[in-house]
Image (tube, rainbow, N blue to C red):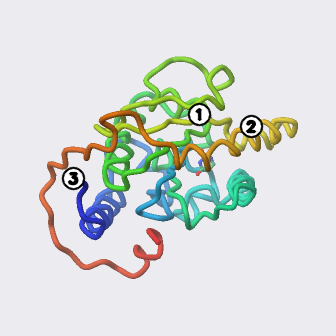
Amino acid sequence: MSEPRELRRERLVELYREASECTRCPLSETRANVVFGAGNADAALMFVGEAPGAEEDRQGLPFVGRAGGLLTELLAGIGMGREDVWICNVLKCRPPGNRDPQPIEIESCEPYLFRQVELIEPRVVATLGNFATKLLSGSRAGITRVRGAPQVREIAGRTVFLLPLLHPAAALRTPSLVDTLREDFAKLPELIERPLPEGAGAPAVVELAVTAGETPANQLDLFG
Ligand code: URA
């Protein structure tokens, strides 16, 4: 049995508060804002990117720069809006100069991502680019090899369809890749409706105690 929606949402807000003060890795010293994630806290579809860039760091929101513009456009192409999905990253803080995430940063930050999967309960996790794909598929296979082919994966104790996708930033650098991304995005509506394999949908074991707390309005806006 799944946790009631309101309880999961309350716990997500608690996780947001915790992440907002995180000092688990040195990125906390250089970030302007923690970029926790945003969108529909009950979404069937979750996007996971790499890490916030400059604009995301400034606004505290994921995918609000140029790559985010393309992501929004690709979503519109399949009849969806950002309010229908959850969007987040492997890293919640910006690596200086947008360098690649370091293993220690991924290790420190991944519990937030796994907990987001537990609390939002997506059926489909679309990974954007190599870092998210390798982390959540548990495989070293690179994105160009695995993109566009759905996998069944267990993430944080939940069975999901994982759909590896090219990172929108790659398509901004190489415009011919936009068509590839469009083609792969077109698989999402059917995948969201596809029954998960036997035994899927079993609730994650939630071990954290519930702490009731006030939910500030701006956080509710974030979690639509
Ligand atoms: N690239 C990412 O991977 N994430 C963002 O939030 C923005 C750009």
Q: Amino acid at mark 1?
A: Pro
> Residue tagged by mark 2?
170
| Image: 176 above or below 141 | below
Q: Which residue is mark 1?
A: 164
Q: Identify the mark nearer the N-term, 1 or 3.
A: 3
Say left or right for 71 vs 43. Answer: right
Q: Amino acid at mark 3?
A: Met
Q: Is residue 88 left or right of residue 116?
A: right
Asked if labels 3 and 1 touch by Cβ distance under 8 angstroms, the answer is no
Task: Count residues near mark 2 (Cα–Cα under 10 Å), then give few for <14, some for 14-19, many for 20+.
Answer: some
Give the image location of residue 187, x and y in percent. Answer: 66, 42
Name the one closer to the observer, 48 or 218: 48
Whole-angstrom CA distance, mark 1 to mark 3, is 28 Å
Query: What is the secondary structure assignment of the residue under circle 3?
Result: loop
Among numbered discs 3 and 2, the one appearing first in the sequence:
3
Q: CA distance from mark 3 to mark 2?
A: 40 Å
Nearer to me, 30 or 223: 223
- Residue at 63%, 42% in the rendered image: 97
The residue drawn where x is 71% and y is 44% is 168
Circle number at residue 1: 3
At x 34%, y 33%, the residue is: 198
Mark 1: give few (<14), some (14-19) or many (20+) Cα within 10 Å.
many
The one nearer the camera, 79 or 48, is 79
First along the sequence among labels 1 and 2: 1
Task: From the viewer's perspective, tell me whether residue 126 is left or right of residue 44.
Answer: right
Q: Amino acid at mark 2?
A: Ala
Q: Position of residue 113 (x, y in %)?
A: 39, 45
x and y percentages locating residue 118 in the rendered image: 31, 48
